[in-house]
Image (cartoon, helix red, strand yellow):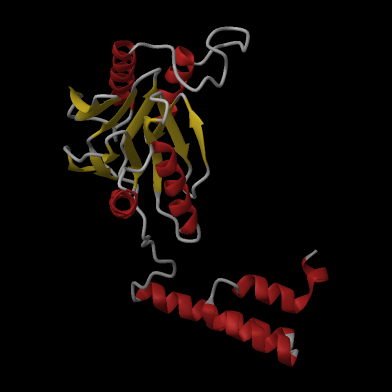
Amino acid sequence: AEAAEGFDDRFHRDCANDPKNARASRSFRRSGRSERAWKEAMARSATWHAEAAEAGVRKHPTWSPYDDNGGTCIAVAGENYCVVAASTRMSTGFSILTRNRSMVREMSPSCLIASAGFSGDADTLHKTLHARQVTYRHDHGKPMSCQAMSQLLSNTLYFRRFFPYYTFNLCAGLDNQGKGCVYTYDAVGSFERTPFSCQGSGKDLVQPVLDNQLRAVSPLLVPPRGAPVTPLSLTEAIDLVKDCFASAGERDIFTGDRVEICIVTAEGIRREYLDLKLD
């Protein structure tokens, strides 16, 4: 197979990741040079890499514009409430940067956004959405609804799809009928409305618990699969969220310290806090 692909293809394949030899590859393709010239070029490449290694030059830099600062967020929608909770630990690798950083941003009296992932992108995203929400309120004389905010968040994430915000978001609150609503997103703006969801480093630990407790095992049971809200009372939903975080904090090193629990009702937004393990 190697002989069949020809000299030019072999040289281009072997030198594609080396800018110096990639230029040589283009020149060889134009001039049709011999196998001997290819071997000489490869020898020069090996010499260059050896000299770079001796000088301590990295061939492949490891810098990235992104970081994953961990944390877990959960949202549960009820008949006349919505519970949004997030851990306050911000980490990078095995280092804790702060134990008291909020992942939840209040956008209006009936809408919250919780973001896990890269805290720098999360802060930028929250500031952008809050500024647009303020402009909307001045233009229309009323705050943006949770449904409108969910679409705005989707559009904002999709607009940055080629250099995306490294955030995994939940938009939650009350809809126009006063029922709880939760919208869950991927990094580029695809979203759906669900009765409950979670994002962040503890998602793999928390989501099965939520599915077990809130999702019907059969569409013939009540509530049916895909119901817009959960059947729990507010107190039961808060207890479930606390149990989920207590469980995730035992296994996920990026979830810990404290949980900020925001309860959205027709009367407004109130907050509770739950202490988790500090290690």
Count of all numbered marks drawn on residues in the image: 0
Which of 228 and 216 lies nearest the eye of the viewer?
Answer: 228
What residue sits 38% from the left and 23% below the top? 76
**Relative to residue 270, is residue 29 depicted above or below?**
below
**Relative to residue 146, is residue 127 depicted above or below?**
below
Regarding residue 221, the answer to whether it shows in the image is yes
* Residue 3, horizontal then vertical, whole percent: 80, 70
* Residue 260, horizontal then vertical, whole percent: 22, 29
What residue sits 40% from the left and 17% below the top? 79
Farthest residue to the right: give it: 4
Q: Give the quadrant of residue 270.
A: top left
* Residue 223, horizontal then vertical, whole percent: 53, 11
Farthest residue to the front: give it: 141
Farthest residue to the bottom: give it: 31
What residue sits 79% from the left and 75% below the top? 6
Regarding residue 126, the answer to whether it shows in the image is no
Q: Give the quadrant of residue 37.
A: bottom right
In-image side of 223 versus 120 (left or right) = right
Q: Quadrant of the N terminus?
A: bottom right
Q: Give the quadrant of residue 56.
A: bottom left
Q: Quadrant of the C terminus?
A: top left
Which of 59 and 34 lies nearest the eye of the viewer?
Answer: 59
What residue sits 38% from the left and 61% below the top? 62
* Residue 132, horizontal then vertical, whole percent: 33, 54
**Relative to residue 225, is residue 42 depicted above or below?**
below
Farthest residue to the top: give it: 221
